[in-house]
Each structure stands twice: as C-alpha cells, then as structure tokens.
Amino acid sequence: MYTLKKRFTFEAAHFLPHHDGKCRRLHGHSWEGWVEVEGEQIQVSGPQAGMVVDFGELSRALQPLLDEYLDHYCLNDTLGIESPTSEAVAKWVFDRLVESDVPVSSITIAETCTSICSYRA
C-alpha cells in the first residue's frame, strides 16, 4: 500500500460562537493541511507511470478551494459552517475533494503547531 501526502497552507480567520473560551472571539491562524491518498497500484504507463496519483493533480484540485473559500477569508462566512472547528474544516475539505473525484483517504488540518485534526471517511 502506498500513501501520498500533499501539504497545503492558508491564512484564515474564524470564531467559534458556542465556545466558552477565547476562541469565541474572531481570531486567525496560519492553517496547514495535508491531503492523503492511498493506493495499492501504481500507474504502469502514460504520463503518470510510476505514480499512484500525480501530486500536480492534487494541487490543481486544492487550488480553487484555497482561492475561493479558505485563504484570507473568515471561514464562518465562506464555508457555510456556523462553528468552523478544525474538525469541521477537515471534513469540509474532504467532502469537496471527493466531489471533485480526488481519491482522498484523509485530510489533516492543523490550526496551530500543537492542535491537529484528521478526518477519514
């Protein structure tokens, strides 16, 4: 089994309206994420020979999400999620990539260097 990981980053604000601590207030993070793809087979011919999936394909699938919803936005406004926790953001990215036919196996989201969440269907 092969596991590929593609890292992505974005700057975004959010607030957690039901939280009982300081995260209730609007604040921002330098978010870091990883798309994970698993596969047992590599391509044997064509432009992706020797690959499970081309990393460039993962980048192309992520870019519209970053440009239109994630990077330099308030996630409460753009994701349609009342309380965009790391868990909710991970699932949101996962679902959008699945809709784009990306064979994603998990999404990991880090809102800080010590607070990380992974979502796997």
Image (tube, rainbow, N blue to C red):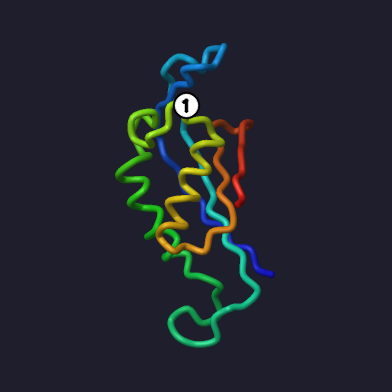
Q: Please tell me whether mark 1 sits on a helix, a strand or a loop.
A: loop
Decide which of 80, 16 is in the foreground and name it. Answer: 80
- Above or below: residue 117 compared with residue 76: below
Which residue appears at 55% of the width and 49% of the height? 107
Residue 85: x and y in percent read 52, 30
- Above or below: residue 81 compared with residue 24: below
Which residue appears at 57% of the width and 61% of the height? 37
10 Å crowding of disc 1: few (<14), some (14-19), many (20+): some
Q: State left or right for residue 34 relative to residue 13.
A: right
Decide which of 38, 19 is in the foreground and name it. Answer: 19
Could you tell me which quadrant the N terminus lies in?
A: bottom right
Q: Quadrant of residue 67?
A: top left
Which residue appears at 38% of the width and 39% of the height? 70
Which residue appears at 53% of the width and 53% of the height? 35
- Above or below: residue 1 compared with residue 19: below
Farthest residue to the left: give it.
68
Residue 90: x and y in percent read 52, 42
Residue 65: x and y in percent read 36, 48
Q: Quadrant of residue 86?
A: top right
- Above or below: residue 46 compared with residue 90: below
- The total of numbered circles placed on residues is 1
Report which residue position mark 1 lands on.
83
Farthest residue to the right: give it.
1
Q: Quadrant of residue 3?
A: bottom right
Specify the amino acid type for callout 1.
Answer: Ser
Residue 82: x and y in percent read 43, 27
